[in-house]
Amino acid sequence: MKGFLENIISPRDLKKLDISQMGELAEEIRERMVSVTSKKGGHIAASLGAVDLTVALHYCMESPRDKIVWDVGHQSYAHKMLTGRLRNFDTLREMGGLSGFPNANESEHDPFTSGHSATSISSALGLAVARDLQKEDYKVVAVIGDASLSTGLAFEGLNNAGNMKTNIVVVLNDNEHFISKPVGAMSRYLNNVISNPLYNKVREEAEKIVKGIPKVGKATYKTVKRFQEGLKNLIVPGILFEELGFRYFGPIDGHNIEQLVLMFKKILTMKEPVFVHTITRKGKGYRYAEEDPVHFHGVSSFDVRTGRTDQEDPEEWFTGHFSRKIKELGTRDKKIVTITAAMPDGTGLREFEKKFPKRFFDVGITEQHAVTFAAGLAKGGMKPVVAIYSTFLQRSYDQLVHDVSLQRLPVILCVDRAGLVGKDGPTHHGVFDIAYLRSIPDLIVMAPKDGVELELMLEKAVEWKLPVAIRYPRAKAMQFVGSSSCEPLEIGRAELLRKGADLAILAVGSMVNTALMASAVLSKKGIEATVVNARFIKPLDKQTLEDLAHGAKRIFTIEEGVIDGGFGSAVLEFFEKENISNVKIRCLGLPDEFIEHGAREELLRKYHLTPDEIAATIEAEL
């Protein structure tokens, strides 16, 4: 006998179910979620925790007419199943299959494509104001997690919405568990507000009154004391949001569907800003995700019975090399401090934190603050190392310009996940950092060919006392296939790896190994290529470029980033500026478009960046 889920083709089908059947539907959703993600990987813990909330929202709303705006989208898997994508859910995160995040190109039920934190309130407010200006009538709900709520953009949206008195509902999915442990003032506010002055004032007045009752006062007070936490939650949590102009409701059990439905039916009729605070459990319904929600935030495939994931040895990855080296440098130099924006595990800083807890700072999902905070540390005489994903560093562009490079402060940016990151898709690919970093004056930008070179770059960056960015991919730091010239790492100095008479390949970062393998393929066909490891995206090695122009009529640049404005563009600009016109240059890289999700190897093949594909392109050009 089929369950309820198989009959849900659209949110309208939810209305056919009795409220008492919703719990069983939620369990079916969780079972399907665990089954699919165990094979495909994904952001399972947050999605498991948001199932009941999602069911209740869709039961009370009329999507796609009514709009649900998911923040980040880590918790949107149930939403996908309930909005006509159940049949394709087993293609999750596959190339050509369902995205792991809300995607406006995938479904009319997804108002926005999302993957970064804290965008939901501002974008939902824009929808609500557009609705009002056009005299339309539909509901707009933003669903945001407790980690995202700590960001500046979220508060900007809340402040604007409350001030405008716009009809909008903000639902806080408070699972009391960020990607890593909760940090910052908002975490303390949501989870430990007992020191609030208003609460204490009420408690003190209650204590006086109760203790003043003859004979039974003191005994009664002991009983009242046991209700302290309840009193706290009744009085304190909503104050901040009420002051911002919202009607506050909560905290509410985010797993009690009947209670959620009754509440949403009333709240969605209100014509004012409303803030709903729900308490959920990350990983709800799957034991291993509940016990270790950090690990199950985003996982590869895993064994459903044991919860064991198929993770490869992180020591072999570029991130592993960074992790080991920064801990070694921290042992040698007590001025080295590290900063992460809520990603201590993903960036490899956890080991540094364990050894030097006072010199490690997790600032939460506040990338802009992280960079400016680092600038302050540098100005004060410390040596800050900011480990951050390429796609999230985009959010700190102004801070990189104004607070770091303009001041010429020795902040070291370790830009992880640079290039194609795979199944998380267009919101997470780190393909723009070369273009946006090389436009900033006085910033040195490097890319290592392997893990050993990454460690060397990190060691030198600490010595140089200049703003430095080191970009490296989400990939194994594979053993180098060629023989290094052992040239010292000097600012703006490239490395000659192979000499050939027919053409030159100038590669950077993750593409150096690929270039050497492509040259080997060409050599078998009688085509000999010079291969250069650029090492520096900025400044370029001008002498090497001039030497290549004298010795080769064809130069190919290769990079794992967008071509427009990228490393190859920098090389073209150099030859134009120096009026060198006797050499033909072809830039190989990623096109001027948002790259879909899929395995990194599949995407490299699709965009002709494998050794065989590059060799074929070069041979065709010749």
Image: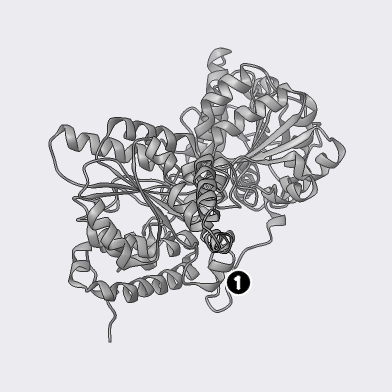
Q: Residue at x 44, y 65 (%)?
A: 48
**Residue 323, position in %: x, y?**
73, 48
Residue 367 picture quarter? top right
Q: Residue at x 37, y 43 (%)?
A: 120
Q: Residue at x 57, y 46 (%)?
A: 188
Residue situated in front as seen by the camera: 370 or 439: 370
Q: Secondary structure at mark 1?
A: loop
**Residue 257, position in %: x, y?**
33, 66
Residue situated in front as seen by the camera: 448 or 338: 338
Farthest residue in the front direction? 214
Above or below, 393 against 28 in this view is above
Q: Residues within 10 Å of mark 1 (few under 14, many from 20)?
A: few
Above or below, 620 against 494 in this view is below
Q: Is residue 505 visible?
A: yes
**Residue 11, position in %: x, y?**
22, 62
Farthest residue in the right direction? 332
Q: How is the image coloured?
A: one colour
Q: Is residue 458 left or right of residue 252?
A: right
Amino acid at pointer 1: Arg
Q: Is residue 184 left or right of residue 249?
A: right
Residue situated in front as seen by the camera: 500 or 28: 28
User: Looking at the rendering, in which quadrant would you find the N terminus?
Assistant: bottom left
Q: Is residue 410 visible?
A: no
Q: Is residue 471 left or right of residue 109?
A: right
Determine which residue is flagged by label 1: 308
Residue 153 picture quarter? top left
**Residue 41, position in %: x, y?**
50, 63
